[in-house]
Image (cartoon, rainbow, N blue to C red):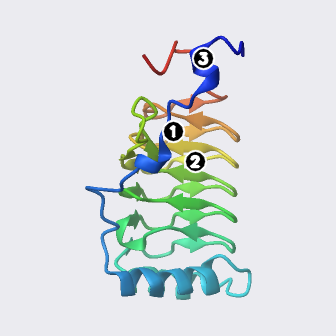
Amino acid sequence: MNSADPASTSSFLQLGEYRNTGYTPGASLVCRVLWYVVNEAVFRTGWFPFSALKRALLRLFGATIGPGVVIKPHVNIKFPWRLAVGEQSWIGEEAWIDNLDRVSIGQNCCVSQGVYLCTGGHDPRQPSFPLVTRPIVIGDGVWVGARALVLGGVTIENNAVVAAGTTVNKNVAGNDLVVGAAGVSKGPVRP
């Protein structure tokens, strides 16, 4: 950047002004701390490969989990009380369900290894960088391929396929196949 350019000499973002007002994690501090310990000890490790135990623990912490759900090792789930997974669905190794908002996964879905479901972000148009959360809805019979990224506010309708490595930032119609990354310039983000 040119040093005469005002954008190069000062930061638009003022992270010291960030306030997490208006957002609640949805559970008490004690519950969140207990979940953190369980998540680290049982879900994020490879020591407990047993899906029945994981289903029971998720239900204990308020998740809606259907029968036959398979949860592989090294899965990270932010808040189980904001999670619903339909029967016979699979959550692959190293999947990260970053559910600051509600995540609903239908029945007979495959959320493959390394998938990142991200319901939270920030508004870059405001210097205080406020938190923005939006839910993710994944319909029945959906396959989200390895290392895909699904952003908040997205609905993936029944029987759609998200190819490996795809970034999903808008709704996906039923029976559609989506491939690739969204990298098209939309113009300036700030005034």
Asked if residue 103 lies left or right of residue 40, the reply is: left
Q: Residue at the location (37% across, 74% down)?
A: 63
Closer to the chain start, of discs 3 and 1, is 1
Query: Would you name the residue on which mark 2 appears?
Result: 143
Q: Nearer the viewer, mark 3 or mark 1?
A: 3
> From where the camera sits, is residue 141 visible?
yes
Q: Amino acid at mark 2?
A: Trp
Give the structural element (helix, strand or loop) at label 1: loop
Mark 1, residue position: 160
| Marks 1 and 2 in Cβ contact (< 8 Å) | yes
User: Left or right of 82: which side holds 69?
Assistant: right
Image quadrant holding the N terminus, namely top right
Task: Tell me: 185 left or right of 136.
Answer: right
Residue 113 vs 185, above or below: the answer is: below
Residue count near mark 3 (Cα–Cα under 10 Å), binned few <14, some 14–19, many ≥20: few
Which quadrant holds the C terminus?
top left
Q: Which residue is mark 3?
A: 184
Would you say the residues marked 3 and 2 are in contact, meaning their CB atoms lie under 8 Å apart?
A: no
Give the CA separation, mark 3 to mark 2: 25 Å
In percent of width and height, residue 154 lies at 42, 39
Q: Position of residue 190 (x, y in %)?
A: 46, 21
Question: Residue 123 is drawn in which quadrant?
Answer: top left
Which residue corresponds to the image point at 34% horizontal and 78% vertical from the top-left?
A: 62
Image quadrant where residue 100 sits? bottom left
Q: Amino acid at mark 1?
A: Ala
Label 1 and label 2: CA atoms lie apart by 7 Å
Question: Closest to the observer: 131 or 175?
Answer: 131
* Three-letter code for the amino acid on which mark 3 is drawn: Val
